[in-house]
Amino acid sequence: SDSISSREILLLLGGLAVGAVGATYLHKCMGSRVSERVQQGKKVIAGEGEEELQQEQFKRNIQFVGEDEFAKLANAKIVIVGIGGTGSHAAHLLARTGVQHLRLIDLDQVSLSSLNRHAVATREDVGKSKVEVMKEHLLKTVPALECECVRDILTQDNGRRLILSTDPNDLECLTESKPDFVVDCIDNVETKAFLLSLCKAENVPVITSCGAGCRCDPTKLTICDISEAAGDPLLKATKQVLGKTYKIRKGIACLYSSEKPPRKLLPFTENEEDISEYSTLPDIHMRVRIVPVLGPMPAIWGNALAMYVINTICNQPFTPQPVESRGRKYWDNLMNKVNAAETKFASTRNVECGNLNKDEAFFVVEYLWNYLSAFSGIASSQRDGLTIARWDIEKPLSVDNAIPLLVSEAARHYGTKGKPLPWTEQKQREIERILANSKQE
């Protein structure tokens, strides 16, 4: 019927009553929580109960790693060398996660052009010391943080003092204390290699960061042993100095990108600032080219560095994607196999023999094809490994005439075993386009 029964009215009133009670209870709970936060805010303003405030501030971190592991992190002494885009983000997140002892080393000042990537600097900070700006900001968030600022440039003469001395700003201090971790965010090859060699010699845990500039693909970021990393210009030069000068070829954690930089270094022009303006010391020019950089990339790198340090100190499960296929042994075996096959093919067909060096092979396999077969798009496996073959079998093997194929596919492509590969017109056009672009790159 159209009329509402007494029973329905009672049910409606009962529902409203229950809802009102629930709303009242919820309001009280929310009010209690808001009141609690207000009281905490008053304590912050009054500067009271710092230990209690820290417990609340770092509660989520403590819940994740546990009290014992968090205590290790809080007591750890961490040195960060280079407080630019990458280093500033690493320092920022380490402090926010609960690290109580940071030593920041950098001679440079905040510039207007660095505001697109620095973690905390503002326009008001332009011209100020990077380490002082960093410390000032961090103390607003973590007042109990012990933050040492070292306005200096690390060299072979002062490196030991800056990293190991209990007072790095005291030239006469002879007391040393090893840090628990060093984060290397230096962009100068010689200085970078020296710092890594010092940490290696003193058995100080260290992770080195390669270049974040000229890149835009965060999915290509990898943490591995420095011996397994390849493709980064800064990394390549650093590894050469480490091997030649310090006889170090492995045993150092490395953060690098396998992305082929889509942008190149830019030269200074007449409209750019004088190079000397980029250095506080007039005779030291560590920067002779402009590095295009998108702000999010150094932030991602800095966060990755911070997480590696945190996971290592707190004994958290951390298994970076293996890069065994990119190690020296892999490339040596691949090059021996490829060049031997090229020599045999040229001799059998009585055609000119080509040759690829390791850097060229890396360019083809990593940059152009991302370790996938140009024919099937399949990655190599234990049963059918990846090799490099001629695209045009009548021309010598070269960077602009080389494609990665599975071994079984290469045999079919060369006509030595099995049916010829059924190349589609679309696939052929794609390969021709990629090889044409490789000439320019």
Image: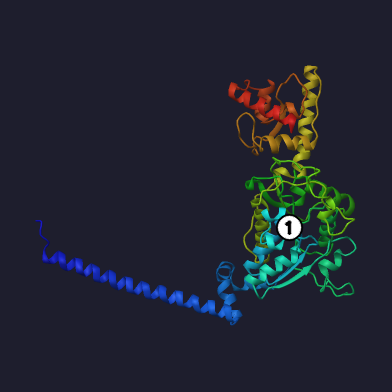
Q: In percent of the image, x 83 and y 56: which residue is there?
A: 279
Res. 341 visible in picture: yes
Q: How did the renderer colour the structure?
A: rainbow
Up the image or down, 83 lies above or below 269; here it is below
Q: Residue furthest top?
A: 350
The image quadrant that residue 201 belongs to is bottom right
Quadrant including the C terminus: top right
Per the image, the residue denoted by label 1 is 84
Q: In percent of the image, x 67 and y 23: which residue is there?
A: 413
The amino acid pointed to by label 1 is Gly
Q: How many marks?
A: 1
- Please provide percent x and percent y for residue 418: 64, 22
Residues 63 and 143: in front is 143
Up the image or down, 327 lies above or below 177; here it is above
- Please provide percent x and percent y for residue 357: 80, 34
Res. 424 visible in picture: no
The image quadrant that residue 137 belongs to is bottom right
Q: Residue furthest front?
A: 271
Say what secondary structure mark 1 lies in. Answer: loop
In this picture, residue 434 sits left or right of residue 356: left
Up the image or down, 215 lies above or below 383; here it is below
The image quadrant that residue 171 belongs to is bottom right
Q: In percent of the image, x 84 and y 73: which residue is there?
A: 176
- Please provide percent x and percent y for residue 364: 72, 34
Quadrant including the N terminus: bottom left
Up the image or down, 358 lies above or below 239; here it is above
Residues 176 and 290: in front is 290
Crowd tier of the residue under label 1, counting other residues whose Cα lies within 10 Å: few below 14, some 14–19, many 20 or above: many
Residues 30 and 424: in front is 30
- Please provide percent x and percent y for residue 105: 78, 64
